[in-house]
Image (cartoon, grey):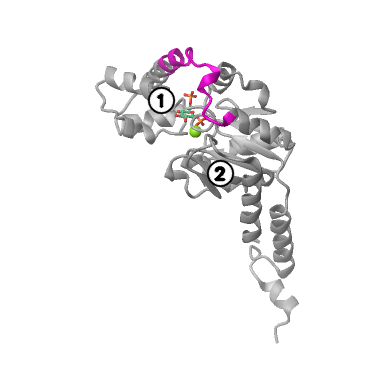
Amino acid sequence: MTSAVGSAKTAPADLPSATDSDSLTRSIREKLAMPIHAFVFDLDGVITNTAEYHFRAWKRLAEENRIPFTRADNEALRGVSRRESLRRLLNGRDLTEEQAQDWMARKNSYYQQHLQGLTPADALPGVTAFLAAARSRGLKLAIASASRNARFVLNRLELTQRFDVIGDGHSVSEPKPSPDLFIWVADQLRIAPESAVVFEDAEAGVDAAKLVGCLTVGIGNAKVGHADIHLPDGLKTARVDRILTRLEAVRSNRE
Ligand code: B16
Ligand code: MG
């Protein structure tokens, strides 16, 4: 007869024992019960629509090099790092590392020319009121953007002071869909990622946030329909209380 102890002894080392799985269940339950401490916002597509300026800058570079590039092609660059954007624009064409650096620098200088015209009026509808409402609920606020220009954009929008932490394209080396930026931001906020709600307009951003247990709110386009909540109109009519209630419901359904 094989006793429970005996079978545990002979079980492969990588299979959890009953005790392991009990503590795993307990740890998942504890994480699901964590209060929400922070709202973490992507920048382009959530706080402001710099996607249009990214498009014009990539388009200019593409035209200079006779590469076809449409507004629809630009959708595939949403939330994607500068280098990955270039790779997608090239669509299999080869560049040396030196050329790639030169092309990325040129695109960035075209993009930065557009940013000079950015004003506080370029925050998307409802953003400033939503940030104020979240703050008055005692939530911490942060940015998690792939952009290396995020601080400049926030300064032009006069929103920098609204955030406790700003994570950008300089904060970590692995871009979304790696979850590293969300881990970095949670760490800086001194909270667990499970206590953060991430607002994202890009599929890669929602995927990355989910990987580390953040709750997710998809903003705008249908590609983020797999987030815990989807707000097709962005933050325009969003209510902090309502979002918190809906996310609590999402959590209790997961238990
Ligand atoms: P940069 P987000 C992203 O911003 C943009 O959506 C994406 O189009 C851009 O390529 C990326 O930042 C890098 O931006 O060239 O300024 O470093 O959506 O993560 O706020
Ligand atoms: Mg974005």
Front position in the image: 215 or 207: 215
Q: Which residues are magenta?
A: 108-127
Vertical side of 7 occupied by 54: above or below: above
Is residue 216 rendered to the left or right of residue 6? left
Residue on which disc 1 sits: 52
Residue extending farthest to the bottom is 1
Horizontal and vertical percent for residue 163?
A: 67, 27
Dominant secondary structure of the residues highlighted in magenta in the image = helix
Q: Earlier in the sequence, mark 2 or mark 1?
A: 1
Front position in the image: 64 or 227: 227
Q: Amino acid at mark 1?
A: Glu
* Dot 1 alpha-carbon crowd within 10 angstroms: few under 14, some 14 to 19, many 20 or more: some
In what element is the residue under mark 1? helix
Front position in the image: 63 or 222: 222
Front position in the image: 233 or 67: 233
Residue occupying image coordinates x 43% and y 27%: 51
Q: Amino acid at mark 2?
A: Val
Horizontal and vertical percent for residue 193?
A: 66, 43
Horizontal and vertical percent for residue 29?
A: 71, 58
Q: Quadrant of the C terminus?
A: bottom right
Q: Which mark is residue 217?
A: 2
